[in-house]
Structure formats: C-alpha cells, structure tokens
Amino acid sequence: MHEWALADAVVEAAAAALGDRDPSCLRGVTVLLGELQAIDQEIFTFALETILADKHFPAGIFRLETENAVFGCQSCGKEWDLDAAADLGPEQREAIHFLPESAHAFLRCPSCGSPDYRLQKGRGVSISSLEVVDRKGCV
C-alpha cells in the first residue's frame, strides 16, 4: 500500500510549494506516475482524494499522467522506450514493471546491442506542474 505514502508525499509537496497561500489558490497539479513505478492508479487516486479532502484543497485539481520509460545507451547515446523492445514477451514486460532493475536481464540497446544503459525517465512519482491563481493573497 505504498500508494498512500506516495499520495501523501505529493499532497505535502504541493502544500509546501504553496507556502503561506491558501489552498484555494491552487488550480491544478499535474502528477507524473512513472511507467515502471508499479502503482495501482485506482488506489493512488482514492488515497489522493481522501488526503486532499482533509487538507481542504479544491476538488479535482490533481491530474495524473503516465511518464513513459525511456532508456539511454551509455555506449552509443541511443534513447528508446519499451515499445522499441518488440521481442520482449509479456512475462518479461511484467518482470520489468514489477522490478525495473531487471530490465538489464532482458533489454539491450536496439542500436548497438550494448547492455550498458540507464533508465532516464519513467520511474518514480513527481509533480510536473502547479497552477496557482493570480489574485490577491495567491501570488
């Protein structure tokens, strides 16, 4: 149930970004959920809505988006995503979603074949944008 802890961290980060401003000043928050984070989005959404109600934030201001996984080859510089790994079977994809570090057992750079790459995007939870109303007490 790490979704509750992640939802709480997102709300706390948004509250910290607001500083002394009233929560009603917040008009939108875009939250990126990494493709490889293994989050149950339904539980995360429920947790977020429950926590937001307790913090007196306006309803419906948090938008969830999936951040696709992007890998970058250390040898040739090629960037690719999981869709580029056409030969990856469903069991291997599931293993990578469950344990992203296992990608190195299944993936190679599609350009040069190197196993030396890094996960550049698609892991974790982050706030990509905050929209604040421009009015007295909100700026």
Image: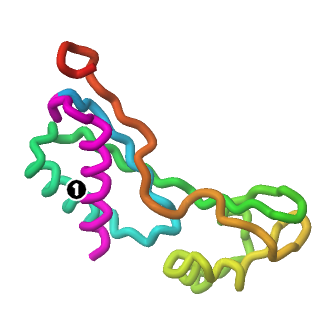
Q: For the point 31% across and 48% down, which residue is it? A: 13
Residue 113 belongs to the span the image colors magenta: no
- Left or right: residue 36 versus residue 21 is right
Residue marked by disc 1: 48
Is 113 placed above or below 52 here?
Answer: below
Residue displayed at 22% across by 22% down: 138
The majority secondary structure of the magenta stretch comes to helix
Colour theme? rainbow
Q: Amino acid at mark 1?
A: Leu
Left or right: residue 127 compared with residue 135: right
Looking at the rendering, which quadrant does residue 101 occupy?
bottom right
Q: What percent of the width, then of the height, locates residue 40?
A: 34, 69
Q: Picture quarter containing residue 62?
A: top left
Residue 24, percent across and down? 15, 30
- Residue 63 in the image, given as x and y percentages of width and height: 33, 44
Of residues 58 and 20, the one drawn nearer to the viewer in this rendering:
20
Please tell me which residue is depicted at 71% across the width and 85% down the height of the picture: 105
Horizontal placement of 57 versus 128: left or right? left
User: Residue 45 sits in which quadrant?
Assistant: bottom left
Magenta segment, which residues?
Answer: 1-24
Q: Quadrant of the N terminus?
A: bottom left
